[in-house]
Image: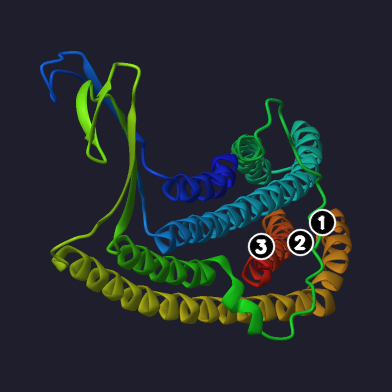
Amino acid sequence: AFKATQLQSEIEILNGKANAGLPKTTANFMYGQYNSFYNKDNNFTVGQTIPFPSALIKERQLGEINGLKAEVASFASWKELKLNIQECYSDICYLNQKRLLLREQDSLINALEDRYLTKAELKAATKLDLALVQSKKKELENMLLRNAQEIRTAENRLELLIGSDHPVTAATDNVIVQLPAISDTTQMDLHPSVLHHKVLGESIQTERSVAVARALPDITLGYVSQTLVGSHSVMGVDKSFGPSSRFSAGQIGLEFPLFFGRVKNQVKSLEVRAEQNSLEGNYAYNELITAYNQEMANYTNYLQSKDLYIENLLPQIEIMQDQSHELLQTGEVSMIEFLQTRQTITEIELNYTELNWQINRSIFRLNWFTETLTR
């Protein structure tokens, strides 16, 4: 689809050149008796209509502007494709990281199950403890199964986006992308969603010029060559002319409309379209700025949350892991309390991984806003 949009610009420029071309040349041949009793006279006429020169110029300009409009649409399509690929890749990284955390938890539960199966045989463990461990194991198996399905779905989508015929995957590291410095939004008017309306406005104005230019007279040129067999007076003297004698003449004329109602209505329609496009362009710009500010606010909040995790929550995980194992071994905590602690640790790790994923997606979107088409 993206490759198709790239070709549209070339198509529009070629259409403009085609519309700026000259109409077909007319050629007529007449044969028979039309001048005397001689019935083999012939007449050959060639004619060409040439639109008013300014109409040809405006047609070519319209093609170039429509080509630029298609280029803007192609760039917008490229931006969307790039964003989708980045987000899809980031999704796979996040899901792979989630799988690692779930597998780590699953390994721990498997070890606990083996331990309590042995203790159950020795009558040293309750059925409740074993049931808790096995139910947690089943829950993790289901979570890993869903995770594998989500990864495969995301990988299939990535294959489609990049047009790959081979399976693709992504690294397991959910790396934070460095956000380039953003000083202001002064270049936001070059974003495709805004630039589209600017170029469309130029296109409408050029269409108006084309409509006016087309109403100007067309120039017609012609050339006639014919036989006039018979006797004809030439400066008072009769002369005879045979089939080999030919008479030639040139023609020039104008074609102009007698009624201008159609052109006036067309021009008025284009003026209304220009006003409509101006309103839509202003709305698109304001909407873009609002969405950008909202995304920047989200990004700031994500970074604040990340600082909270780094400073407070992540340092507690190692303590909770060590203490829960020791207390379980000594019997100071029950299996329920141990599993609750492990659940809390896993939730913190998963939430932190998800937060990194959200930061990545926010960065991709911010870059989508600020990456503009340079004219």
Q: Is residue 170 left or right of residue 73?
A: right
Q: Nearer the viewer, residue 143 or 158?
A: 158
Residue linked to disc 1: 328
Question: Could you say which is closer to the camera, residue 24 or residue 153?
Answer: 24
Q: Seen from this angle, which residue lies furthest left?
A: 37
Q: How far apart are marks 1 and 2 (CA)?
A: 5 Å
What numbered label is drawn on residue 333?
Answer: 2
Q: Which mark is residue 361?
A: 3
Q: What is the CA distance from the residue labelled 3 to the residue labelled 1?
A: 40 Å
Residue 122 vs residue 275, the one in the foreground? 275
Question: How many angstroms separate mark 2 from mark 3 (CA)?
Answer: 40 Å
Mark 3, secondary structure of its residue: helix
Label 3: how many Cα within 10 Å (few below 14, some 14–19, many 20+): many
> Are the residues flagged by discs 1 and 2 in contact, CB closer than 8 Å?
yes
Q: Nearer the viewer, mark 2 or mark 3?
A: 3
The quarter of the rendered structure image containing the C terminus is bottom right
Q: Residue at x 81, y 39 (%)?
A: 111
